[in-house]
Amino acid sequence: MYNILKLNEISKVADKEFSGNYTLVKEAANPDAIVLRSFNMHDYDIPSSVLCVGRAGAGVNNIPLDKCSEKGIVVFNTPGANANAVKELVICGLLLAGRKIIEGIEWAASLKGKGAEVTKAVEKGKSAFVGCEIKGKTLGVVGLGAIGAMVANAAIKLGMNVLGYDPFISIDAAWNLDHHVVKETDINEIFKNSDFITLHVPLNDSTRSLVNKDTIALMKDGGAILNFARGELADAAAVIEALESGKLSRYVTDFPTDEMLGVKNLIAIPHLGASTPEAEDNCAVMVARQMVDFIENGNITNSVNMPACKMPRQGKSRITVFHKNVKNVLSAITAVIGEEGINIANLMSQAKGEYAYLILDLDEKLSDAALDKIKAMESVVKVRTIA
């Protein structure tokens, strides 16, 4: 029986995936795995028993990836599971950026109590809330992953011209992208030529303050920026200054800070991207399936700290090895197995950064002494035997 520690509640649909040999618990001294959403694990003492951590969502800023890698703990996330929910919110933000819908709603609410005058007042006052249509305008999409590609495709269907930028676009994402999306190789062209810009990239050293005084200066006067990815992708001071000067007409984000609240033409939304029952269900099912497949078969899909590595079962025993991505580790491990006179039915080895992962299917079970030899190797982090 495997104990899965819940650091946050996740959708009940995961219970079906964690059925049989799994128990979801809120407390455990030595859990086999951890599942969470927003819980901050950076100051959390991760038990040595943990094989994997599953984040029911895409962002993993709340998980200490380096610490997990050092311990041979796989960290899973669920890219694309909430993509449609975020896409719909971005399209909503796009419409709010183009037209003064929120201001109109607030003004209409202020007419409460005026009785029969309301009908005439709303007709007379609507001219103060004129905005633009998005059809025919140019949308720049920075980041063409699961969400960015869906936003780009939806914008094409809404009659927009779409420019896309992503130097690391995956083959799958490229195949799913509408052929009308114009791919730019220079991000500055996105800032220069777009009426609206939407951000869909992860936060790292190269993307922090991607929107800043210099990049905003490249934009058309009166352009708008949408940030539903990470707050720190934009320099808040530069955004506020541009809104006050009129260089930017709108900034729409679901990562507002105190300094942003109350700023004219800055639309601050709670972080609602994945706040739909459908998205929560999708994330829960996806992360549960990935964790079960890893626990039972050693397969890795959608890990943020370890390489993707998946192999059909073959042979009588499976061994998995996390190790540093250095030379001669694979040959040293297979040599130990060869000394035992055991045939390797199949193997797969994949690397990601400074770590690598090996799956070995053997025709016979490896002895404890041989396993100890592999575990004792300097570059080996963790060894598992899966029956």
Image: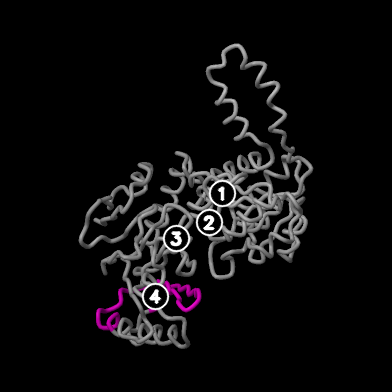
Q: Which quadrant is the C terminus positioned in?
A: bottom left
Q: CA distance from mark 1 to mark 2?
A: 8 Å
Instruction: Give residue 264's position: percent from left, percent from top.
Output: 60, 44
- The secondary structure type at the circle numbered 1 is strand
Identify the residue shown where x is 25% and y is 51%: 26
Identify the residue shown where x is 66% and y is 55%: 242
Q: CA distance from mark 4 to mark 1?
A: 39 Å
Task: State the residue in front, 53 or 311.
Answer: 53
Label 1 packing within 10 angstroms: few (<14), some (14-19), many (20+): many
Q: Which residue is mark 4?
A: 322
Q: Which residue is mark 2?
A: 231
- The secondary structure type at the circle numbered 2 is helix
Q: Which residue is mark 3?
A: 60
Q: Which residue is mark 1?
A: 253
Question: If you read the primary sequence from the N terminus, does the residue marked by circle 4 or circle 1 appear first?
Answer: 1
Q: Quadrant of residue 188?
A: bottom right
Q: Which residues are magenta?
A: 343-372
